[in-house]
Amino acid sequence: MWFDNHCHLTSLKTDPAEAVNVAAEAGVSRLLTVGCTVEDSARAIDIAASFDNVWATAGVHPHDAKDGVDGLASLLDHETDGVRSVVAVGECGLDYHYDHSPRQQQADVFAKQIEMAHERDLALVIHSRSAWDDTFAVLDRCGIPDRTVFHCFTGGPQEAQEALARGVYISFSGIVTFPSAPELREAASITPPDRILVETDSPYLAPVPLRGSANKPANVAVVGNFLADHLGTDVDEFAAVTTANANRLFGLSSDFQ
């Protein structure tokens, strides 16, 4: 059973229920739908509330840091039937590839969300692209939450070592299947079994051999099978290990619905 620990059900062109059902048919038993703005996070919470096996995050992506974090705290504190409606803050971080928001604003909004995760003892989901040094600098200055993941990891072994030295989890998306990403596969090779995760980041980044099509949560099984083969690990064992890691990261019970 796989856990797609990072997808965007709010961005799929298909109905979320269809995506969840198709994923189940592919052996994907749990999904985490991730918020990128306050409004998007509110939609993610609503979607997750409709399923027993879908959870949500709330956060502000670095692309949208220019809009601030007004309203985010209330989403993080929102409860459904006495249970907090989100399991993590994010995705948040730094993106110097596109620079859709000024870099100082990105850093400020990132730091605010790290603080929110600390205050609520929530997991932190990090987006970092072309900004490794500054990402680590902000984390070191603010303090790294006990449960933190670099989602859609795009670094090489050096960046992986820096991340792992800080006690975080590393999540690999379909990019790891791309022929142009040997350094990413090197990073996966040095990631300990208790720190590795798999994700789709759907509807983006469909893995080989599905490039050119819209990605979907079901395809986390494709990513997982590829990585298991690359690491020389039994597929069922790798699915169990990565799912256990995701459960631990997001504070979820290991009991399946």
Image (cartoon, grey):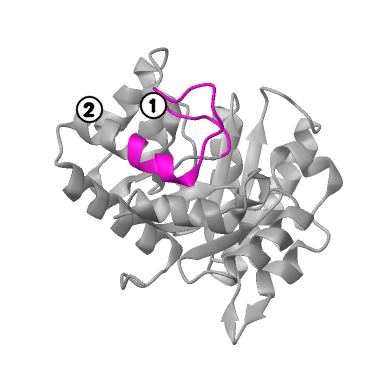
- Residue 145 is left or right of residue 102, and the answer is left
Percent of width and height locating residue 95: 66, 31
The secondary element bearing badge 2 is classed as helix
Please tell me whether residue 122 is drawn above or below residue 139 in the rendered image. Answer: below
Image quarter in which the N terminus is found:
bottom left
Q: Quadrant of residue 18?
A: bottom right
Percent of width and height locating residue 32: 51, 56
Identify the amino acid type marked 1: Val
Q: Spatial distance from mark 1 to mark 2, Cα to Cα?
A: 10 Å
Percent of width and height locating residue 162: 41, 34
Highlighted range, magenta: 203-222
Mark 1, residue position = 176
Q: Which mark is residue 230?
A: 2
The answer to whether residue 169 is seen in the rendering is yes
Determine crowd level at label 1: few under 14, some 14-19, many 20+ residues with C-alpha closer than 10 A: many
Identify the amino acid type marked 2: His
Please tell me whether residue 212 is drawn above or below residue 36 in the rendered image. Answer: above
Dominant SS of magenta comes to loop
Image quarter in which the C terminus is found:
bottom left
Looking at marks 1 and 2 on the same chain, the residue that comes earlier in the sequence is marked by 1
Residue at 80%, 33% in the rendered image? 101
Q: Quadrant of residue 106?
A: top right
Residue at 59%, 55% in the rendered image? 16
Q: Nearer the viewer, residue 65 or 48?
A: 48
Residue 31 is one of the magenta-drawn residues:
no
Q: Nearer the viewer, residue 74 or 241?
A: 241
The secondary element bearing badge 1 is classed as helix
- Residue 210 is left or right of residue 222, and the answer is right
Residue at 58%, 61% in the rendered image? 56
Please report contact status of discs 1 and 2: CB closer than 8 Å, yes or no: yes
